[in-house]
Structures are given as structure tokens and as C-alpha cells.
Amino acid sequence: MFFTEVPGSKESNLTPRIRQTAAVLWSVYFTLTLIEAVILSYLGMPIFDSICTSLSTISGGGFSPKAQSLIEYGQLKYIWTVAIFMFFAGFNFALQYKVFIKRKILSLFKDEEFRLYFFIVIAFTLIIALTLTSHKIYDFSQSIREAVFEVLAVMTTTGFASVDYSEWNLRAKLFLFILMFTGASIGSASGGLKLLRLIVIFKYMKRQISKIHHPNGVYPIKINKIILNEDAVKQMISFVLFYYGIFVISAIILIFLEQNSTTGVAAAIATLGNIGPAFGDVIGPMGNYSTLTLPSKIICIFNMIIGRLELIPFLALLHPDFWNFKRLNYLHKVK
């Protein structure tokens, strides 16, 4: 179950034992949380609020002591600080350990997933900022600030809000909606599909096209120059198919129950990706899910559970062989 997070990738094996690897990742997680809390407290945020905000940032939780998230603080210094740490929360903790602890700086931009993560953040920030500026919603500097914060909040599935983006124009909201389907990096605190899986899907499609022209050619799929075995590739493809399948089914049911297409589609992807706030007056950044019907809440709960546990481990838990293995293992210990 541990290795379903990064199937087939040897780069995640920081140490020989899973327990040691978990300790390394926890150390990165704790260090980032502590540094953010200290910085926010130094900048003037109340100590309790700085601790809660830091815990919520690095975990990708997005909860704030304030009802309107970071909007209520009204301080740009807090927004920029949280945005920076959301960026760190969105890329692989194992990679951060290599870069900042082991001092392997060059491994940062050698990592395919990080390069894509960095590119998407920059590209979508600029596109949304230019869209907001052209529609005279904000000036360019404020557009950059709000765009980068909301891009990171949605992409890392943290779900903080620095502004009510429901008031943005349709084009800007569309780009945020696209990011709800990506997530951030494997091995990070974010939910969603994760970028590595999308990279593998793209390379698989490229390989299939190449095989049309050269049927006998051998085209191994590589991530950071490491060849993924076919089982890992199939597992990732299965994950994506299951993910989109659950999204489509839950979206259709939610639309039927709520009689609102925006609420149904947005709630389905926001809960499955563990983003939190979505779109619309009901479940937008200034709203909540309390007004949804009971059946809708049950569906959202189901989406959040499988989205947070990761789909493949969740399905593995439901398989009868898992429980047979646990029972046989217990009987062996008793004997």
C-alpha cells in the first residue's frame, strides 16, 4: 500500500526501510510547518493563528481560524508567506529532502514532475492575471498576487482563499477549474490525481502513437531516466480511469440531487480532490456545504475518503484477499 503512492519509482526509496523513509518525510513536514509558524508569528499573526495556519498549509487542509480564511487578516505579508509555503507543500517531500538536506541542488530541475509543477504554476498565474487585468477586475500587481495564491491553493488542494474568486470572470474561473483535475506532486501533501500520473499517461499515449508508425519498436516509459515497469504504468492508467469514473458518476448524481449543474460538478471534483471550496454561491470560497441535501453530503463524504486515502489503497482494502491475508497472519501469530 505504501508503494502505490509512487508505483515503480525507485527515486522514493530514500532509505532501506519504510519506517526510516517515513521518519525522513515527517522531518521535512515538521520542519516546514515550524518555519512557517515562526515566520507568521514574527510578522504579527497571533501565535495560535500562526500555528493553525501553518498546520493547515503544509497538510493541504486549508482550514483557517477565520471564517473568511486569509481575507479577514487583510495583510499582504500573510498572503505571500502562505503562498510560498503552499508551493513547498505541493512538491515532493522526498525531493525536498534531497535538495535541502543532502544538498543535491541539481536534482531539483532534473526532476520531470517538479519542472511540470513549476511551469504550470507560472503559466496559469500569468494567464489568469492577464485575464483579470484585461477585464479590469484588478490592476496587474493585484492580479498577479491573487492569481498565484489561488492557483497554488487549488493546485495543491489546500483550499485557502485570499479573495472571493466566484466574482472573477468565466475565463479565469475556467483555468482554476482545470487545475482541480491536476493536483500537485507525488509524495506531497496535495490531493488530486498528481502530476506524475498525468506525465505517465501522456508518455503512454505518445508511445502508442509511435507504435502506429513503428509496430516493432520498443518504447520504454521513463521517469527521470528510470524505466517504469508495465505493471506500474497499468496501475497508473487504472487509477486515472477510476478517478474520472468516480468523478463523472458522483457529478451526475449531485446534479440530480441539487438541481444545479455548477454545484454538482464543482462539488464532485472539489471533494474528490480534497480541495474544499469550489464554485458558486453555495460551495464557493465564501460558502460551505451545509446547505446540501443529506444524500449529497454522503456522496461528498465518500469522495473525500477515497480522495484522501488514495484510490488504489482504498480499493485494496475492500478486496477479500486483503482480509484473508490479515486473518491468516493473525492465526499464524496465535499458533
Image (cartoon, rainbow, N blue to C red):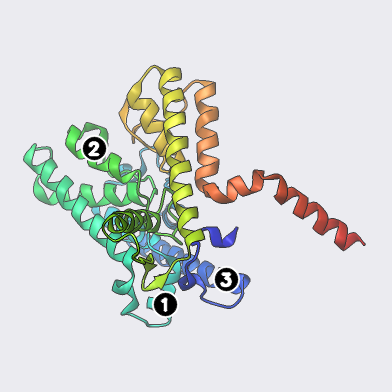
Q: Quadrant of residue 98?
A: bottom left
**Mark 3: which amino acid?**
Ala
Query: On the rendered image, what quadrant is the N terminus found in?
Result: bottom right
| Residue 174 numbered tag | 2
Q: Is residue 138 above or below residue 236?
A: above
Q: Nearer the viewer, residue 26 or 40?
A: 26
Q: Nearer the viewer, residue 21 or 64?
A: 21
Neighbourhood count class around disc 1 (C-alpha, 10 Å): few under 14, some 14–19, many 20 upward: some
| Residue 146 numbered tag | none
User: Which residue is drawn at the image coordinates 47% and 36% (left, top)?
Assistant: 246
Give the mark nearer the N terminus: 3 vs 2: 3
Give the mark nearer the N terminus: 1 vs 2: 1
Residue 144 located left or right of residue 149: left
Q: Position of residue 252 (x, y in %)?
A: 42, 25
Q: Quadrant of residue 326?
A: bottom right
Neighbourhood count class around disc 3 (C-alpha, 10 Å): few under 14, some 14–19, many 20 upward: few
Residue named by callout 1: 98
**Mark 1: which amino acid?**
Lys
Label 1, label 2: how far apart the Cα atoms are: 35 Å
Label 3, label 2: how far apart the Cα atoms are: 39 Å
How many numbered markers are drawn?
A: 3
| Residue 23 numbered tag | 3
Give the mark nearer the N terminus: 1 vs 3: 3
Label 1, label 3: how far apart the Cα atoms are: 14 Å
